[in-house]
Image: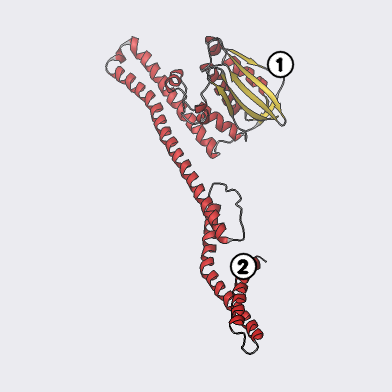
Amino acid sequence: MKKHSRNFPLIIIATAFAVVISVMSFVYHPFMENPLARSIGIFFISMLSSFLMILFIKILVFKKIFNLLNTVQKFKEQSDVSSPKLPYSSNEIHNLSIEILAWIEERKSEIDRLKKLEVYRKEYLGNISHELKTPVFNIQGYVLTLLDGGLEDPSINRNYLMRAEKSVDRMIAMIDDLEAISQLETGELQIEPESFDIIVLLKELLEAQEMQAKEKGIALTINEGNKTLFVFADRFRIRQVIVNLIVNSIKYGKQGGETKIRFYDAGANISIEVADNGIGIAKVHLPRLFERFYRVNKSRSREQGGTGLGLAIVKHIIEAHNQKIKVMSTEGVGTVFSFNLKKG
């Protein structure tokens, strides 16, 4: 049926040619013997010859167009980019034009995406080298001081060794975090979900961070502190997520501020929010906030400590639970991180 519909325009064109030739033969040879019969014969001969000629042209030209169209479609199927449904018609040339234009747009988008990834890769390599360079240079300085005579000085040797140990600990923490992210990305680090009371976990974590919060006069509160709320998730990994979010809210909170943990019923899930009224984050930084080593304020962030990988780990852990981490923030007002967990 499809072939008949494709050949239909050829029949129309061939018929038109035949009609023209037949009419001309009848008009210009009206006195020939039985001109009507002769014209009818010429009509069928002309129609057949016209159809064969156009069909021959179609085989030569249109077959190449069909092959080119199929090649473009195969390239699109192999692409990682999902393609929208295109408005096809019975005109193969029109379809080929649509396919090529769509393919060009996809390649352009892919090139733009690769350029952005290349920029991020360069930034990432620069960031990781800088992050590792700082503790390495610190250790080198402490060791050289000790070798230059500080080792025999009781007021220096122990102090410098303890400082060197802190730098080593920072490097180990960074390597552990990088390893955890890589394992989460590749699926090597398996999530082990269990049913547990998220309220109990939160109370433990808030108690652990209470001293740090008091130093900045920040109050830590839970809106559902007296309830029992079970979720089905990896307790250890969710502990990492919440610790990172609470510590960040304290680091970048205002003196005398507040960090609130809020819970909402979201059908089959529990929605969890960690909200603060701290310094907030500019909108320009939000799309890249969960990248490895990305820092909103580099100098201030490094002064606060940490590996620069906390939010990247948070993102990967939540995604490993088939959920998404969201952030809303306004400069000078505060920040809200939210994610869902399945009810337990």
Q: Earlier in the sequence, mark 1 or mark 2?
A: 2
**Relative side of 195 to 102, left or right:** right
Residue 41 at x, y percent in the picture = 63, 83
Per the image, the residue denoted by label 2 is 9
Q: Splitting the image into 4 quarters, where does residue 155 fall?
A: top left
Q: Residue at x 46, y 44 (%)?
A: 111
Badge 1 marks a residue whose secondary structure is: loop
Q: Nearer the viewer, residue 157 or 2?
A: 2
Badge 2 marks a residue whose secondary structure is: helix
Classed neighbour count for the residue bearing mark 2: other residues with Cα under 10 Å, few (<14), some (14–19), many (≥20): few
**Relative side of 249 to 343, left or right:** left
Quarter of the figure that contains the N terminus: bottom right
Q: Nearer the viewer, residue 70 or 61?
A: 61
Type of amino acid under label 2: Pro
Q: Splitting the image into 4 quarters, where does residue 116 fall?
A: top left
C-alpha separation, residue under disc 1 versus residue under disc 2? 78 Å
Vertical comparison of 150 with 176: above or below: above
Q: Nearer the viewer, residue 314 or 102?
A: 102
Type of amino acid under label 1: Asn
Give residue 247's mark: none
Q: Which-is-in-front pick, marks 1 and 2?
A: 2
**Relative side of 313 to 120, left or right:** right
Per the image, the residue denoted by label 1 is 226
Q: Residue at x 32, y 20 (%)?
A: 141
Q: Residue at x 51, y 67 (%)?
A: 61
Residue 158 at x, y percent in the picture = 37, 14
Residue lying furthest bottom: 33
